[in-house]
Image: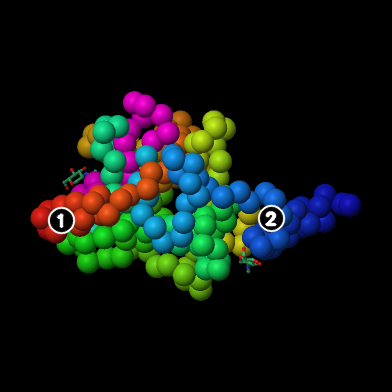
Protein backbone atom coordinates (compact mmCIF):
# COMPACT_ATOMS: atom_id res chain seq x y z
CA UNK A 1 0.00 0.00 0.00
CA UNK A 2 1.32 3.46 -0.84
CA UNK A 3 1.85 5.69 2.20
CA UNK A 4 -1.00 8.01 1.17
CA UNK A 5 -3.39 5.08 0.83
CA UNK A 6 -2.21 3.66 4.14
CA UNK A 7 -2.95 7.03 5.74
CA UNK A 8 -6.40 7.10 4.21
CA UNK A 9 -7.05 3.52 5.33
CA UNK A 10 -5.90 4.41 8.84
CA UNK A 11 -8.14 7.47 8.79
CA UNK A 12 -11.13 5.33 7.92
CA UNK A 13 -10.17 2.79 10.54
CA UNK A 14 -9.86 5.45 13.23
CA UNK A 15 -12.76 7.65 12.37
CA UNK A 16 -15.42 5.48 10.86
CA UNK A 17 -15.30 2.47 13.16
CA UNK A 18 -18.63 2.21 14.89
CA UNK A 19 -18.40 1.75 18.64
CA UNK A 20 -20.83 -1.16 18.30
CA UNK A 21 -18.16 -3.05 16.34
CA UNK A 22 -15.85 -3.01 19.37
CA UNK A 23 -15.68 -6.68 20.36
CA UNK A 24 -18.07 -7.43 23.19
CA UNK A 25 -15.32 -9.20 25.14
CA UNK A 26 -13.36 -5.93 25.27
CA UNK A 27 -16.21 -4.20 27.04
CA UNK A 28 -16.14 -4.84 30.74
CA UNK A 29 -18.67 -3.64 33.26
CA UNK A 30 -17.31 -0.76 35.33
CA UNK A 31 -17.49 -1.54 39.05
CA UNK A 32 -17.80 0.69 42.11
CA UNK A 33 -15.61 0.52 45.21
CA UNK A 34 -17.74 -2.26 46.65
CA UNK A 35 -17.30 -4.33 43.48
CA UNK A 36 -20.83 -3.79 42.18
CA UNK A 37 -21.50 -2.97 38.53
CA UNK A 38 -22.23 0.69 37.85
CA UNK A 39 -25.86 1.08 36.81
CA UNK A 40 -27.13 3.57 34.25
CA UNK A 41 -29.00 6.51 35.78
CA UNK A 42 -27.97 5.87 39.41
CA UNK A 43 -25.98 8.26 41.59
CA UNK A 44 -22.23 7.88 42.13
CA UNK A 45 -19.46 10.02 43.55
CA UNK A 46 -16.38 10.19 41.36
CA UNK A 47 -13.56 10.04 43.93
CA UNK A 48 -9.81 10.15 43.53
CA UNK A 49 -8.37 6.63 43.38
CA UNK A 50 -5.39 7.68 45.52
CA UNK A 51 -5.04 9.26 48.95
CA UNK A 52 -3.69 12.81 48.93
CA UNK A 53 -4.63 13.37 45.28
CA UNK A 54 -7.81 15.36 45.91
CA UNK A 55 -11.42 14.53 46.64
CA UNK A 56 -14.52 14.04 44.55
CA UNK A 57 -15.74 16.05 41.55
CA UNK A 58 -18.02 19.10 41.93
CA UNK A 59 -19.41 21.97 39.90
CA UNK A 60 -17.65 25.30 40.47
CA UNK A 61 -17.00 28.57 38.63
CA UNK A 62 -14.08 29.05 36.24
CA UNK A 63 -11.97 32.17 36.80
CA UNK A 64 -14.27 35.20 36.54
CA UNK A 65 -17.00 33.37 34.64
CA UNK A 66 -20.16 32.84 36.66
CA UNK A 67 -21.85 30.43 34.25
CA UNK A 68 -21.66 27.79 32.97
CA UNK A 69 -20.18 26.03 35.95
CA UNK A 70 -17.22 23.78 35.29
CA UNK A 71 -16.10 20.50 36.81
CA UNK A 72 -13.42 20.72 39.51
CA UNK A 73 -11.81 18.18 41.75
CA UNK A 74 -12.20 18.98 45.46
CA UNK A 75 -8.84 19.80 47.00
CA UNK A 76 -9.22 17.59 50.04
CA UNK A 77 -9.79 13.83 50.13
CA UNK A 78 -12.58 14.17 52.69
CA UNK A 79 -14.81 16.14 50.30
CA UNK A 80 -16.69 13.66 48.17
CA UNK A 81 -18.06 16.27 45.72
CA UNK A 82 -21.43 15.89 44.02
CA UNK A 83 -22.89 12.68 42.65
CA UNK A 84 -23.21 12.08 38.92
CA UNK A 85 -25.29 9.81 36.74
CA UNK A 86 -23.92 7.93 33.74
CA UNK A 87 -26.26 7.80 30.75
CA UNK A 88 -25.12 5.38 28.00
CA UNK A 89 -25.60 6.37 24.35
CA UNK A 90 -26.91 2.85 23.87
CA UNK A 91 -29.89 3.20 26.15
CA UNK A 92 -30.55 -0.54 26.15
CA UNK A 93 -27.43 -0.87 28.36
CA UNK A 94 -28.52 -0.94 32.00
CA UNK A 95 -24.98 -1.21 33.30
CA UNK A 96 -21.98 0.93 32.39
CA UNK A 97 -19.27 -0.66 30.24
CA UNK A 98 -15.71 0.46 29.68
CA UNK A 99 -15.04 2.05 26.26
CA UNK A 100 -18.72 2.85 25.69
CA UNK A 101 -20.11 6.31 24.96
CA UNK A 102 -21.75 8.08 27.87
CA UNK A 103 -23.23 11.35 28.93
CA UNK A 104 -22.28 12.27 32.48
CA UNK A 105 -24.62 14.46 34.49
CA UNK A 106 -24.44 16.01 37.96
CA UNK A 107 -27.54 14.86 39.83
CA UNK A 108 -29.70 17.52 41.53
CA UNK A 109 -27.87 20.28 39.67
CA UNK A 110 -29.77 23.24 41.08
CA UNK A 111 -27.71 26.42 40.65
CA UNK A 112 -28.11 30.12 39.91
CA UNK A 113 -27.02 29.33 36.37
CA UNK A 114 -30.30 27.48 35.65
CA UNK A 115 -28.37 25.11 33.45
CA UNK A 116 -28.32 21.38 32.90
CA UNK A 117 -25.87 19.28 34.92
CA UNK A 118 -24.75 17.42 31.78
CA UNK A 119 -21.00 17.54 31.17
CA UNK A 120 -19.57 18.96 27.97
CA UNK A 121 -16.27 20.50 26.97
CA UNK A 122 -15.90 24.26 26.68
CA UNK A 123 -12.93 26.42 25.75
CA UNK A 124 -12.49 29.50 27.93
CA UNK A 125 -8.73 29.87 27.49
CA UNK A 126 -6.42 28.89 24.67
CA UNK A 127 -4.22 26.50 26.61
CA UNK A 128 -6.85 24.11 27.95
CA UNK A 129 -10.33 22.74 27.48
CA UNK A 130 -12.60 22.67 30.52
CA UNK A 131 -15.24 20.14 31.31
CA UNK A 132 -18.23 22.37 31.99
CA UNK A 133 -21.92 21.84 32.66
CA UNK A 134 -24.96 22.82 30.57
CA UNK A 135 -24.40 20.08 28.02
CA UNK A 136 -27.19 18.13 26.33
CA UNK A 137 -27.68 14.39 26.81
CA UNK A 138 -28.68 11.96 24.10
CA UNK A 139 -27.74 11.15 20.52
CA UNK A 140 -27.95 13.68 17.72
CA UNK A 141 -26.56 16.48 19.88
CA UNK A 142 -23.27 18.25 19.24
CA UNK A 143 -20.10 16.28 19.80
CA UNK A 144 -19.02 18.03 22.99
CA UNK A 145 -21.09 15.88 25.32
CA UNK A 146 -19.50 12.39 25.04
CA UNK A 147 -17.25 10.64 27.52
CA UNK A 148 -16.02 7.12 28.22
CA UNK A 149 -14.68 5.31 31.24
CA UNK A 150 -11.55 3.17 30.77
CA UNK A 151 -9.61 0.97 33.16
CA UNK A 152 -6.48 2.66 34.47
CA UNK A 153 -3.09 1.02 34.83
CA UNK A 154 -3.80 0.19 38.48
CA UNK A 155 -6.28 -2.41 39.61
CA UNK A 156 -9.67 -0.94 40.47
CA UNK A 157 -8.89 2.59 39.22
CA UNK A 158 -10.40 4.18 36.14
CA UNK A 159 -9.75 7.13 33.85
CA UNK A 160 -12.38 9.23 32.13
CA UNK A 161 -11.95 10.23 28.51
CA UNK A 162 -13.56 12.90 26.38
CA UNK A 163 -14.56 11.59 22.96
CA UNK A 164 -14.82 14.34 20.33
CA UNK A 165 -17.20 12.14 18.37
CA UNK A 166 -19.00 9.02 19.60
CA UNK A 167 -18.04 7.29 16.32
CA UNK A 168 -14.31 7.89 16.86
CA UNK A 169 -12.32 5.34 18.74
CA UNK A 170 -9.83 8.09 19.55
CA UNK A 171 -10.59 9.82 22.83
CA UNK A 172 -8.52 12.02 25.10
CA UNK A 173 -7.92 11.46 28.76
CA UNK A 174 -9.26 13.99 31.24
CA UNK A 175 -6.87 15.35 33.83
CA UNK A 176 -6.62 18.19 36.28
CA UNK A 177 -5.05 21.58 35.57
CA UNK A 178 -4.72 24.88 37.42
CA UNK A 179 -5.45 28.35 36.07
CA UNK A 180 -4.21 31.54 37.71
CA UNK A 181 -3.80 31.46 41.44
CA UNK A 182 -7.29 30.47 42.50
CA UNK A 183 -6.06 27.06 43.66
CA UNK A 184 -8.92 25.24 41.95
CA UNK A 185 -8.28 21.87 40.36
CA UNK A 186 -10.03 22.17 37.01
CA UNK A 187 -11.00 18.99 35.17
CA UNK A 188 -10.38 19.04 31.45
CA UNK A 189 -7.81 18.61 28.72
CA UNK A 190 -4.53 20.48 28.81
CA UNK A 191 -1.05 20.30 27.36
CA UNK A 192 1.12 17.60 28.90
CA UNK A 193 3.18 19.17 31.67
CA UNK A 194 0.35 21.51 32.68
CA UNK A 195 -1.74 18.59 33.58
CA UNK A 196 -2.07 16.02 36.34
CA UNK A 197 -3.51 12.60 35.76
CA UNK A 198 -7.00 11.96 37.05
CA UNK A 199 -7.49 8.43 38.37
CA UNK A 200 -10.86 7.75 39.88
CA UNK A 201 -13.08 5.23 41.63
CA UNK A 202 -16.87 5.31 41.95
CA UNK A 203 -18.84 5.25 45.18
CA UNK A 204 -22.59 4.75 45.15
CA UNK A 205 -24.45 7.72 46.68
CA UNK A 206 -27.22 6.65 49.02
CA UNK A 207 -30.60 8.36 49.44
CA UNK A 208 -29.43 10.32 52.49
CA UNK A 209 -26.42 11.69 50.54
CA UNK A 210 -28.78 12.76 47.75
CA UNK A 211 -31.09 14.61 50.16
CA UNK A 212 -28.11 16.30 51.88
CA UNK A 213 -26.75 17.40 48.50
CA UNK A 214 -30.11 18.76 47.33
CA UNK A 215 -30.62 20.72 50.59
CA UNK A 216 -27.07 22.09 50.34
CA UNK A 217 -27.68 23.14 46.71
CA UNK A 218 -30.88 25.02 47.60
CA UNK A 219 -29.27 26.66 50.67
CA UNK A 220 -26.31 27.90 48.61
CA UNK A 221 -28.49 29.62 45.97
C1 LIG B 1 -26.80 -1.80 22.39
O1 LIG B 1 -26.54 -2.71 23.44
C2 LIG B 1 -27.16 -3.98 23.24
C3 LIG B 1 -27.01 -4.79 24.50
O2 LIG B 1 -25.71 -4.69 25.04
C4 LIG B 1 -26.53 -4.62 22.02
O3 LIG B 1 -27.10 -5.88 21.79
C5 LIG B 1 -26.74 -3.71 20.79
O4 LIG B 1 -26.05 -4.24 19.69
C6 LIG B 1 -26.22 -2.32 21.09
N1 LIG B 1 -26.59 -1.42 20.01
C7 LIG B 1 -25.71 -0.65 19.38
C8 LIG B 1 -26.25 0.22 18.31
O5 LIG B 1 -24.53 -0.65 19.67
C1 LIG C 1 -10.58 38.26 36.60
O1 LIG C 1 -10.82 39.62 36.32
C2 LIG C 1 -9.79 40.48 36.82
C3 LIG C 1 -10.24 41.91 36.60
O2 LIG C 1 -10.77 42.09 35.30
C4 LIG C 1 -8.48 40.15 36.12
O3 LIG C 1 -7.45 40.98 36.60
C5 LIG C 1 -8.13 38.68 36.39
O4 LIG C 1 -6.96 38.34 35.65
C6 LIG C 1 -9.27 37.77 35.98
N1 LIG C 1 -8.98 36.44 36.41
C7 LIG C 1 -8.97 35.38 35.60
C8 LIG C 1 -8.62 34.08 36.23
O5 LIG C 1 -9.24 35.43 34.41
Q: Is residue 183 above or below residue 31?
A: above
Q: Nearer the viewer, residue 75 or 191?
A: 75
Q: Which percent across, then down, holds residue 50? A: 41, 29
**Would you say residue 218 sits in the magenta stretch?**
no
Q: Which percent across, then down, holds residue 8? A: 76, 57
Q: CA distance from mark 1 to mark 2?
A: 41 Å
Task: Sort mark 1 into few (<14), some (14-19) or many (20+) by Cα contacts within 10 Å.
Answer: few
Residue shown at the point (37%, 48%) measured from the top left:
204
Residue marked by disc 2: 24
Occupied quadrant, residue 218:
bottom left
Compared across the picture, whether 43 is left or right of 19 comes to: left
| Image quadrant occupied by the C terminus | bottom left
Judging from the image, what secondary structure is the residue with disc 1 in?
helix
Coloration of the structure image: rainbow
Compared across the picture, whether 3 is left or right of 128 comes to: right
Ligand 2 falls in which quarter?
A: top left
The segment highlighted magenta reads 48-65
Q: Which percent across, then down, holds residue 110? A: 21, 61
The answer to whether residue 206 is seen in the rendering is: yes
Q: Would the CB of label 2 be found within 8 Å of ligand 1?
A: yes
Amino acid sequence: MKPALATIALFFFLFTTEPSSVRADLLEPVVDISGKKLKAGENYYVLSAFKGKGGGLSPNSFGNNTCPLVVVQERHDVHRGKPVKFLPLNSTNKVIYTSSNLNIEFSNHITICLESGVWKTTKFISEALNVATNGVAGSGQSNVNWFRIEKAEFDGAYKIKFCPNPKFIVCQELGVFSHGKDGKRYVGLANPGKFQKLRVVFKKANVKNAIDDAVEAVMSM
